[in-house]
Every structure is written in C-alpha cells, then in structure tokens.
Amino acid sequence: MPRMIFVNLPVADVERSAGFYAALGASRDARFSQPDTAAAMVFSDTIVVMLLSHAHFAGFSPRPIADARAATEVLICLSEDSRSAVDGSVERAVAAGGRADLRPKQEMGDVMYGRSIEDLDGHVIELMWMDVEAMMKGRPAD
C-alpha cells in the first residue's frame, strides 16, 4: 500500500468547508465523515484532507487551535495538470467563498506556474503546475 497523507484542518463550519473543498475537486468519503463534525475530502488515492470541527479537532491536540488568518500553521500545495487547471481551481475556489492570490502569481514561463487561495477559515492552499522534465534540464547532477 502506498503511503498516504491526511491533512487535518480545524474549520468553523464543516459542511460549508466540505463544499469549498469539493469545488477544488475533492470528493467526500462518507465512511470517514460525520455531519457537522468531520468530513474526509479525498483528492487522490493518497491525499485526504480531514475537515474537523473545532471541538472535534481539539480532541487530537493539547495545543490551542491557531487562527489561520493571524498566523501560518501549515502551507498546503496541490499540483494541477496544467496552467489552465490552476486558474480553473482558483475560479472555483473563489465561487465557493475563498479568496484568490494572497501573493503574486508564480510565473516561471514554460516550467512552473502557481497561485494561492485562502479557504473559508484562512488556511492557505497553493495550486501549482510544473513541467518536471523542463525543471530538471540544466540542473547539475547531484
């Protein structure tokens, strides 16, 4: 079995946040979701974002929940298949209540392109397309 990553995020409104992440292309896995408490949002076979109510999240950590609008707690970067897919995801995120381009777009010609969005609770997500082969050309061998 490949290793998986589960990103656990505290959110104010699980159902609204699930709609936001669905707009980014995730699907809800009902097996690991509870209405208004937890939503398992699946991006791929190996990437799951767990949206947890503040009360539920608090049961996993003795530390206080960070205010994502005041401090950076985590920076999530999701890859996309093309530049246009990055732009499309940003448009869907904005339509679902998010905020786009918290910092300037990352323009690296035909090699890489990235944008950022903020979800409903202030968590920052970067969306990035990269041509790995082009990126590796010209790099010195290790």
Image (cartoon, rainbow, N blue to C red):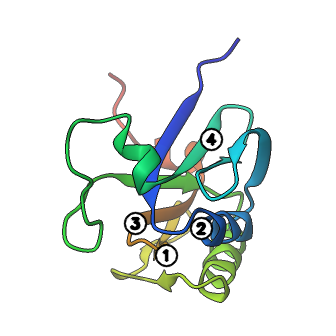
Q: Identify the disc placed on residue 48.
A: 4
Earlier along the polypeptide chain: callout 1 or callout 2?
Answer: 2
Q: Within 10 Å of the Cα at label 4, are there few (<14), some (14-19), or many (20+) other Cα atoms? A: many
115 or 35, which lies in front? Answer: 35
| Label 1: few (<14), some (14–19) or many (≥20) C-alpha neighbours in 10 Å | many
Real-space CA distance between mark 2 and mark 3, rounded to the nearest whole angstrom: 13 Å
In the rendered image, which residue does mark 2 sit on?
Answer: 17
Q: Amino acid at mark 2?
A: Ser
Q: Say what amino acid the circle numbered 4 marks.
A: Val
* Residue 90 appears left or right of 31: left
Task: Tell me if residue 37 can be seen.
Answer: yes
Check disc 1 and report its element: helix, strand or loop: loop
Choose top left, top right, bottom left or bottom right for residue 16: bottom right
Is 62 displayed left or right of 20 in the figure? left
Label located before the other in sequence (2 or 4): 2
Q: Nearer the viewer, residue 91 or 17?
A: 17
Residue 124 badge: 3
Q: Dividing the image into 4 quarters, which one contains the N terminus?
A: top right
- Please, is residue 30 above or below residue 45 in the view? below
The answer to which image quadrant residue 84 occupies is bottom right
- Front position among marks 4 and 1: 1
**Cα distance in 3D space between marks 1 and 2:** 7 Å
User: At 54% from the left edge and 35% from the top edge, which residue is drawn?
Assistant: 6
Asked if disc 1 and disc 2 are in contact, CB closer than 8 Å, the reply is yes
Q: Secondary structure at mark 4?
A: strand
**Residue 66, position as x, y percentages in the image:** 24, 58
Q: Secondary structure at mark 3?
A: strand
Q: Position of residue 103 (x, y in %)?
A: 33, 80
- Say which quadrant the C terminus sits in: top left
